[in-house]
């Protein structure tokens, strides 16, 4: 990781599924989360893709349709509005486009994007889907099956070094709506500069994150008030 210069005017937000929960999208590990309905090995792994691609496509087609049917919430909007005052980089584990639809302009999707498909033979071939489904037989320009542009369990998180450098130089780091259970994303907290202001906002009051000020509450309620104090 390059030693990036500390920038007091830079904010990095690290978000997880809990930020999109108030918009109506399920999380993964809460009671009604995806991993309570599915085994991730069956729908979000290279092995599942090899053995039952139709099941995998259906899992993401349903999530893509659902994500297109909801709106960004006040938490997403508060993060987007920070751009009026700070250089803001959003590092999200979420694959929905709610940050972008709320107005955030620099979003790093660590785990991919629901609204994109990519070739199974040439990963540089990425296609915009909007909310359209991917079907077996949908092929890239080279004749290979299209797959969701998602980082599955066991696949490389290619954007992690870029994200770590952004976090390391931020004067303020805000972590919101993530259980911090999945690496390497969860390891980004430890990349924060010692002088950075660090907040962790989550519904779960029990969560403690070393060096972070923990604020318990719902992202769509906490963030507007918290971030307003940053822009006064
Ligand atoms: N406001 C704030 N936090 C919330 C809210 C809310 N309204 N609702 C839920 N949360 C919190 C939960 O307390 C929990 O800490 O959001 C977190 C959701 O955790 P997970 O379901 O584990 O989601 P996430 O951390 O984003 O998962 C990381 O795991 O399965 C993979 O690729 C998947 O990107 C995902 C990664």
Image (spheres, rainbow, N blue to C red):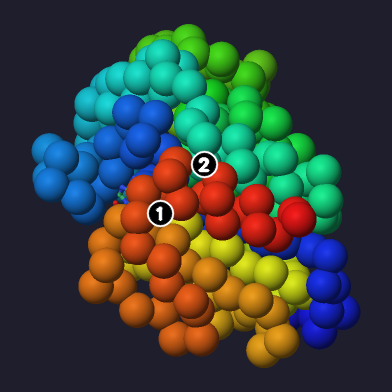
The residue at the point 36 percent across, 35 percent down is 22
User: Which is in the foreground here, disc 2 or disc 1?
Assistant: 2
Left or right of residue 169, residue 156 in this image:
left
Cα–Cα span, label 2 and label 1? 10 Å
Per the image, the residue denoted by label 2 is: 75
- The percent position of residue 181, horizontal first and vertical second, equals 33, 67
The residue at the point 63 percent across, 20 percent down is 128
Q: Which mark is residue 177?
A: 1
Left or right of residue 232, residue 79 in this image:
left
For label 2, being within 8 Å of ligand 1 is answered yes
Q: Are marks 2 and 1 in contact (CB under 8 Å)?
A: yes
The residue at the point 26 percent across, 62 percent down is 204
In this rendering, the answer to whether 45 lies above or below 119 is below
The residue at the point 83 percent across, 51 percent down is 85
In this rendering, the answer to whether 121 lies above or below 117 is below
> Label 1: few (<14), some or many (≥20) within 10 Å?
many
In this rendering, the answer to whether 219 lies above or below 145 is below
**Helix, strand or loop status at disc 2:** helix
């Amino acid at each position: 990781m390059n030693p990036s210069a500390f920038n007091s005017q830079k904010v990095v937000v690290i978000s997880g599924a809990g930020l999109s929960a108030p918009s109506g999208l399920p999380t993964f590990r809460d009671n009604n989360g995806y991993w309570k309905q599915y085994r991730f090995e069956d729908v979000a792994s290279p092995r599942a893709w090899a053995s039952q691609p139709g099941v995998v496509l259906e899992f993401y087609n349903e999530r893509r349709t659902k994500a297109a049917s909801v709106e960004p919430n006040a938490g997403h909007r508060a993060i987007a509005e920070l751009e009026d005052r700070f250089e803001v980089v959003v590092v999200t584990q979420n694959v929905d486009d709610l940050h972008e639809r709320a107005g955030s302009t620099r979003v790093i999707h660590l785990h991919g994007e629901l609204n994109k498909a990519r070739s199974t033979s040439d990963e540089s071939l990425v296609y915009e889907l909007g909310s359209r489904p991917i079907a077996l037989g949908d092929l890239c320009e080279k004749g290979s099956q299209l797959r969701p542009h998602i980082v599955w369990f066991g696949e490389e998180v290619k954007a992690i070094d870029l994200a770590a450098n952004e976090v390391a130089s931020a004067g303020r780091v805000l972590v919101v709506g993530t259980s911090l259970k999945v690496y390497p994303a969860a390891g980004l907290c430890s990349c924060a500069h010692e002088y950075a202001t660090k907040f962790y906002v989550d519904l779960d009051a029990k969560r403690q994150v070393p060096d972070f000020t923990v604020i318990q509450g719902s992202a769509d309620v906490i963030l507007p008030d918290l971030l307003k104090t940053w822009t006064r």
